[in-house]
Amino acid sequence: MIRKTVEFSTLGTRLSVSHRQLVVERPDLPKATLPIEDLGVVIVDDVRATYTQAVFLDLLEAGATVLVTGRDHLPVGMMLPLAAHHVQTERHRAQVEASEPTRKRTWQALVRAKIAQQSVVLRHFTGHHGGLAPMIQRVRSGDPDNLEAQAAQRYWPRLFGKAFRRDRQADGVNALLNYGYAVVRSAVARAVVAAGLIPSLGVHHKHRGNPFCLADDLIEPYRPFVDWRARLLASDDGASVPSLSRQETRAAFLSLLNETVFVGGRREPLLLALHTSAVSLCRTLTGGGRTLMLPEGLPLEPEDFEDGEVE
């Protein structure tokens, strides 16, 4: 079953639970209910929202992720289920004991896939890979030459204009990217936990203050999907960018999780593709296989931006 991604942004929303249904009460709107089991990612973009404790308990028990955004509409917090897999302890132990060569080969595969995806995005918008395609096979185990960063130096100015600089604190296109990455990151973290892995124990990212290092590893080849959507929304030179305060702008990124993509040679909605990738990552880190299932190419059937599920 494809779980839904929903956002609540009406000021004064109240969320509660009754008979395994998420009850949504909003000013001047009829009461609505959603089956808890149908929800995969829940985003609350309302500084006045109120909840009952049962909302978090039931959503987390059902395996959903809860994101809370700040006044700038960007996610500031995330809740994930802890007991997500019946052999979690066994997999945690195997993950901790994974060898350094295994971790380095895994990071190599993730960087190669990311650069390949970036080259596809550039081809789509500019007609040329921008020099990225030849770099893919040059990525060695552990990426000691930091070809990931070298690719980024070529990628960003070709995608959003020579003046563009990737800045996590900036507005405009950067704000779109920040929001899109946060949405996909939450879904990646959920997939990692559901696969029985420790989200804080990464193969490359190792910051001691980051509880989602492994999710930040696995998200890398999925980031170009966000870049693609941001480029579709922005003007050619990046000068005209829709605001995140607009519901339809946020819906454009939420709908990414429903896009159909290729992963491991199969067509799957992106939300399910993340789980496919996470399961293959689990096999790699715990000695059950050496092949990562990662995305290939752009979404097959881009949806209308207004089709994103936003409440």
Image (cartoon, grey):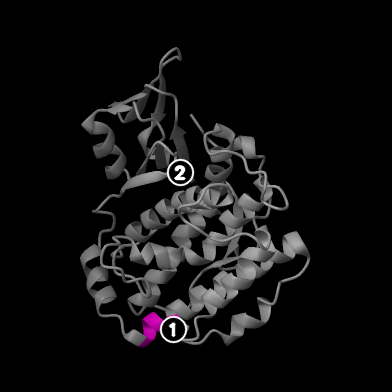
x and y percentages locating residue 180 in the rendered image: 51, 50
As drawn, is 298 to the left or to the right of 258? right
- The amino acid marked with disc number 2 is Arg
> Which residue in the structure is indicated by mark 2?
3
Q: Secondary structure at mark 1?
A: loop
x and y percentages locating residue 287 in the rendered image: 35, 80
Give the mark nearer the N terminus: 2 vs 1: 2
- In the image, the segment drawn in magenta is 101-105
Q: In the rendering, which numbered label is found on residue 54?
A: none
Q: Is residue 152 above or below residue 241?
A: below
> Which residue in the structure is indicated by mark 1?
142
Residue 267 appears in the picture as rendered = no
Q: Circle 2: is it few (<14), some (14-19), or many (20+) Cα within 10 Å?
A: some
Q: Quadrant of residue 286?
A: bottom left
x and y percentages locating residue 135 in the rendered image: 62, 81
- Nearest the viewer among 89 and 155 is 155
Most common SS among magenta residues: helix
As drawn, is 143 to the left or to the right of 191? right
Residue drawn at the location 41% of the way across and 15% of the way down: 27
- The amino acid marked with disc number 1 is Gly
Q: Quadrant of residue 285?
A: bottom left
